Amino acid sequence: MKYKRITVVCGHYGSGKTNVALNMAYEQRQRGEDVSIADLDIVNPYFRTKDSIDELNNRGIGLICSDYAGTNLDIPALPDEMYAITDNINKNYVLDIGGDDRGALALGRLAPQIIKENDYSMIAVINMYRPLTRDYKSTIEVLREIEYAGGISFTAVINNSNLGVQTTSEDVLASISYAQEVSNNMSIPIIATSVSEKLKNELDGKIDNLFLMKLQKSLINKEC
């Protein structure tokens, strides 16, 4: 996958955006990029990238998140370090943004500078197997609310339709037309369809641009 300096990852609750964001950071680091991940999700404080802090440290990936993340004092507070995202143009950043219009308000603080630099992607992570995004119309409604609150329009879609560890290749294939409808109606491309390692061989040649995802142990059975 090709990356801009800033990759903004958004999606509704349960879309899998946090896992997508982590895997994007891992891929960039594997390529030798200096990358940090920023958890700006102020709505779902218990589904955190901080859960994977040990693996991030082992890979040499920085983390920006609330000081209260992962504690029983978790509050909707944003770290001052988040301004490094727009100030430090020599580093790549992956931003994990909250799952609805309220969560996207955090992005609004950075949006003017991100747009001014114009080296970013705004990725919509979609999952047709979540209750509030089962069809393309309801999915687009959620994504438009996020755009409005965050102040940045989506530039691409990642189809992350899955049922967790129970996902089959048939489940992924059944989601392709749904993702295409979202893409067509928002006039943005599908840049990837995410798959687990166990399904990749089954889906090779059947779906373009597969994005191999390692499910974080800390996120298994969590809707993030």
Image (cartoon, grey):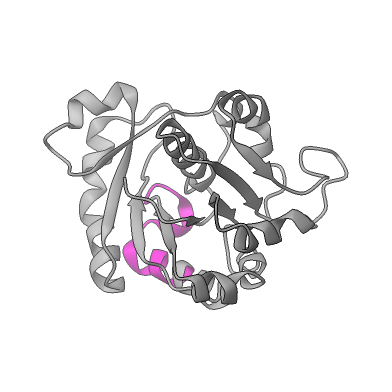
Which image quadrant is residue 87 in?
bottom right
Residue 140 magenta-highlighted: yes
Q: Please name the residue shown 61% across and 27% down the image.
A: 218
Q: Is 95 rendered above or below residue 188?
A: above
Residue found at x 71% / y 42%? 46
Extreme residue toward the front, this view? 90
- Position of the N terminus by quadrant: top left
Q: Which residues are magenta?
A: 128-142
Q: Is residue 12 above or below residue 112?
A: above
- At x 29%, y 30%, the residue is 168
Place residue 32 in its image quadrant. top left
- Residue 188: x percent and y percent? 29, 67
Q: Is residue 167 left or right of residue 73?
A: left
Residue drawn at x 53%, y 41% is 34
Q: Main secondary structure of the magenta part?
A: helix
Q: Quadrant of the C terminus?
A: top right
Horizontal and vertical percent for residue 91?
A: 55, 50
State the image coordinates of residue 139 (x, y, percent, origin top left). Answer: 40, 64
Q: In the rendered view, does 219 fall on the left or right side of 20? A: right
Residue 5's place in the image compared with 29, above or below, is below
Whether residue 221 appears in this view of the structure is: yes
Judge by depth and name the residue closer to the eye, 114 or 139.
Answer: 114
Residue 218 shown left or right of residue 180 in the figure: right
Q: Position of residue 88 (x, y in %)?
A: 62, 57
On the rendered structure, is 3 left or right of 106?
left
Quadrant for residue 180, please give it: bottom left
Any part of residue 47 in sight: no
Q: Magenta span has 10? A: no
Which residue occupies the extreme right position in the image?
73
